[in-house]
Image (cartoon, rainbow, N blue to C red):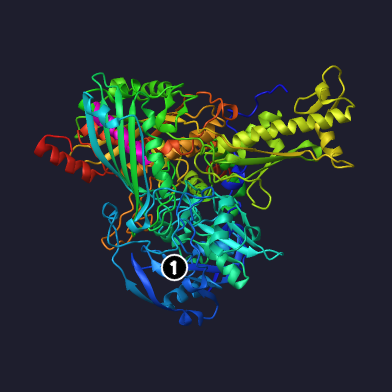
Amino acid sequence: MKRVNQSVNKPIRKKDAMALVTGKPVYTQDIAPKDCLVVKVLRSPHAHARIRAINTQPALKIPGIACVLTYKDVPDKRFTLAGQTFPEPSPYDRLILDETLRFIGDAVAIVAGENEKVVEKALKRIKVDYEVLEPVLDFRKALDNKVIIHPEESWKSLVNVGADQKRNLCAHGEDRYGDADAIIRDCAWTIEQTYHTKANQQVTMETFRTFTYQDAFGRLTCVSSTQIPFHARRILSNALDLPKSQIRVIKPRIGGGFGSKQTVISEIYPALVTLKTGKPAMIIYTRQESQIASSPRHEMEVTVRLGADEAGIIKGIDMQVLSNTGAYGEHGPTTVVLTGHKSIPLYGKAQAYRFGYDVVYTNKMSSGAYRGYGATQGIFALESAVNELAAKMNMDPVRIREINMVDKGDVMPAYFGETLSSCALSRCMKKAKEMMGWDEKYPCIDLGNGKVRSLGVAMAMQGSGIAGVDTAAVSIKVNDDGFYSMAIGAADMGTGCDTILAQIAADCLNCSVDDIIVSGVDTDFSPYDTGSYASSTTYVTGMAVVKTCEKLIEKIKQEGAKRLDDNIAAVDFDGDRVYLINTDASISLKALGNQAMCGNNTPLFTTASFSSPVSPPPFIVGMAEVEIDKETGAVDLIRYVAVVDCGTVINPNLARVQTEGGIAQGIGMALYEDIVYTEDGRNASNSLMQYKIPTRLDVGDIQVDFESSYEPTGPFGAKSIGELVISTPPPAIANAVYNGMHVQIRELPITAEKIVNGMTADEKSSGIR
Amino acid sequence: MIIHLYLNDKELKQEIADDMLLLDFLRDNQCYSVKGGCETSNCGLCTVLVEDKPVLSCSTLAARVDGKHVVTLEGLQEEASELGAFLADQGADQCGFCSPGLVISILAMKKELDHPSDEEIKEYLAGNLCRCTGYMSQLRGIKQYFSECRFHSPSQSEGSTEK
């Protein structure tokens, strides 16, 4: 079949757009039964404590209360909330409710009742006698601390990730290629610095929420704002000790994910209530709960050592990471792997690298998955170190990248030995330079009014799905009148994958996007998909769409040939009809679809599954232009330029908005987002008053362009984009601050206070802080 | 207590709890476009019109709208579709959870500001947070909407009916 490109690379409107902009009731809470019990969680006021006694009687006496559940009411079987492919690398270290409480906000009891008021009242009536234990709050002191956060014998790790619970060690690893120590030792230029990135909240506009009910067959149905319906089914099964066959998970429209909903934060509570009471139940997390008991980015301390020759060629890279997983190990062993493996390969000329890490438990909120998934932390450290090396060598930070960056055909030892099959990084850099006017404005311009305007640069990479793990299946059927229905298991969370995947299918089937209806996700009906995370959907599920369409076209041709009394070799399909190649005889898809519904033994339906042995990295170059007040250190972001290589751009509008949105989140991470704890471990960033995310006045002018490579293993040459785009603002803005003020900020966020302290230190020692 | 109001031009008399929030009242009355996002009047998701002015329904008691006209997106479907199409054509809807509050605020801005500059638009809408888009696509869509709707804006049509 000759393909006529109609939809791919076109800025097609999202299929659900008009429903969303006109406020239709399509989200979890909007579609819940009106008689759902209200579910709330009593949360620990102590960072580390044990329940000596808990009395629920006064709460149960309140009229309208349906149940009050404590650790005595839950299965004694540990599990993880991390939405990962089985066997999960995250340790099984949780109970639904535990006798031991491990952070301020940890779940103590679950209350369900007729309305919010009675439930709030009941929460206050539960009497808990806590034995307060000493907490571990500083992640630098967690390893081998006398206080053990998970002493329980039932703790288990399904995968060897180097964990040792008795040492508060959630994971440990070392990886090397060549002799980095020797190579760096012999280098003309070296640098060694330590960088500190903080925990950040994803802050989806729709907080965590789930409702559950029992269907006509007595099965548990769970409707949830999730990125991982199939993993959620398994996690519910593990947690509730209920066979998977008894659970159905449905994903409606989702109000944002960014990784936060790759962890099963809210699902289990109403599910348990429904099982105990037989009644529908719903939990809506308050913003406060979402800020204190969820799944933020892992705080990390990253030490980078670089060695370069006289010309500035980076020969050796050493990266050592300490990661804070908090009270539980969700995504702890895996995020840290990306810290090295999705930063170090940017520098393609390095002959050796060493990468080591420890992931430790502390008595803070458990960490999780946030866009960038560890790579963002590694990129801040490595890109800052490269900028510091360039400064030390008196070299333009763009130049040092131009002569060191990885290129197509390079074998990447730090990227699991994969060969880079597509890369437009050098074109990205060239275009970003032009857009920013780098050569004219670098390093800075003193505005003469007490302010300085300066530029900074960084690069980043990510993957496209998890190689050899992520699996996506897609089913497509031909209906009467010849329209298609496509079932996917990938979760559109606002990203637009329902539309993007339809664009891919439309071009495979030579039809319009409107001819394809897309449905997802319902674990009873959707084909299996690991879920929407790890930048997998466009690439992995997209390839599953391509495969399914190829199989379906063969079926359509087969059926058409049968109707035309010939064999499949004599026919072709042009999207509208199956026709005999040598004559004019044809049968329309519409007729085939209608005839398939009468006296038919062959369904016009097919499904195909895809998993990739590689994870082709997309690339981005980011450049920041900031204005700094030389007296106060206040930083204003004026402009941010980004050029992306995500392979073929499937939908230019949606890819652009992904990029602009990711950069805005990166700007927040760079300049102010920080989960601050008090000395006793209380989360002080528990509302959007304290935890500020960027408003439209804070992000300057974000300018995005694309330089596409063609990825041979991706759908129509596409790679991923979702996570990549968050990672450059922290190092690029830090670099701009250095280029304007000669103050190097190595701990996020980059606040005015830190800049002023750096200036003062600079005056004292006339050195770089 | 009993309140008496006009919700999307429909007269309504209802018994409510004294401490009921307008957000909860509206959702209880099937205005599901109204979303809550923060509980601290920071995010703008819950914006509705009270007597034509944008108000945060999460921090307004339902009692406060007694005798008033309250309008949610349910009562502005035509306007929302018209404006929303410009946002949709930029891919600016994304997850869409902040869209209703944003759309209400833009419609209010349209009545208040004549030919707003980029800076005026950003300032007017600064209280409407969005975590998906980075705001650029919204600005592009809003500007196009304003430039294309200039010739049939409500203020002008109202003006033409005035003698």
* Residue B37 x %, y %: 47, 55
Q: Is residue A20 magenta?
A: no
Front-most of residues A309 and A156: A156
Q: Is residue A734 above or below residue A47?
A: above
Q: Quadrant of the N terminus of chain A?
A: top right
Q: Quadrant of the C terminus of chain A?
A: top left
Q: Is residue A429 above or below residue A362?
A: above
From where the camera sits, is residue A273 visible?
yes
**Is A444 on the left or on the right of A94, as rendered?**
left
**Is A365 on the left or on the right of A501, as rendered?**
left
* Residue A557 x %, y %: 79, 29
Front-most of residues A253 and A47: A47
* Residue A92 x %, y %: 47, 57
Residue at far left of view: A764
**Is A446 on the left or on the right of A638, as rendered?**
left
Q: Locate residue A759: give its quadrant.
A: top left
**Magenta residues, start to end:** A376-390
Q: Locate residue A373: give its quadrant.
A: top left
Chain at tag 1: A
Residue at label 1?
A: A98
Q: Is residue A405 above or below residue A246?
A: above
Front-most of residues A698 and A512: A512
**Is B108 on the left or on the right of A593, as rendered?**
left
Q: Circle 1 sits in a helix, a strand or a loop, which is it?
A: loop
Query: Could you tell me the amino acid type at mark 1?
Result: Asp
- Main secondary structure along the magenta-highlighted residues: helix
